[in-house]
Amino acid sequence: MKNKALTISLIILVCITLLGAVALVLVLQLNKGETSEEPTIDEIIESSVDVEEITTNLAGKQFIRITLKIQTDNKKSAEELAKRDFQVKNIVIQELSEMTQANLEGKVGKQAFEDAIKQQLNPLMQEGEVQKVYIVSYIIQ
């Protein structure tokens, strides 16, 4: 009776050890596929779209001139975004029309604007997604 219980216990212990080893190998293999290198500057430029200067009114009495560069995750996404330039400009103008000069002041204000544009563009994209929106130049008068 003791030998039978000991044998069953050893079999269960070996099975648990094997399952743990298989799980560890699977997790390590999955993590290998997820490690991605940062893109080079050439890849970033290739997958980016320049938004020509836009001049529009802010929510106050001021107006803004702004130029953007939008980085996507691949070249096909950039090509799609370039075709959607009218939609991009529309989103930028609508977003700016709700903002005041105070909203755009400082690093936090500019980052919030960039994030808002990114969040509104991604649902439009069919090929890939927008990674980052950069303010290349802006003047408020």
Image (cartoon, rainbow, N blue to C red):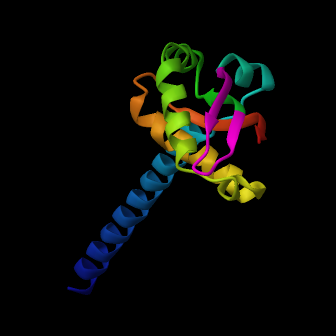
Residue 38 seen in this snapshot: no
Predominant SS along the magenta part: strand
On the image, the x and y values in percent for residue 37 come to 70, 34
Quadrant position of the N terminus in the picture: bottom left
Q: Looking at the image, is 94 positioned above or below residue 10?
A: above
Q: Who's the residue at 50% across and 55% down the image? A: 24
Q: Is residue 51 magenta?
A: yes
Residue 43 seen in this snapshot: yes
The image quadrant of residue 124 is top left
On the image, the x and y values in percent for residue 76 come to 53, 15
Question: Position of 116 compared to 110: left or right?
Answer: left
Q: Who's the residue at 49% across and 50% down the image? A: 27
Question: Position of 94 compared to 63: left or right?
Answer: left
Q: Looking at the image, is 111 positioned above or below residue 4?
A: above
Magenta part of the chain: 48-65
Question: Given the current orientation, which residue lies at the most extreme bottom position?
Answer: 2
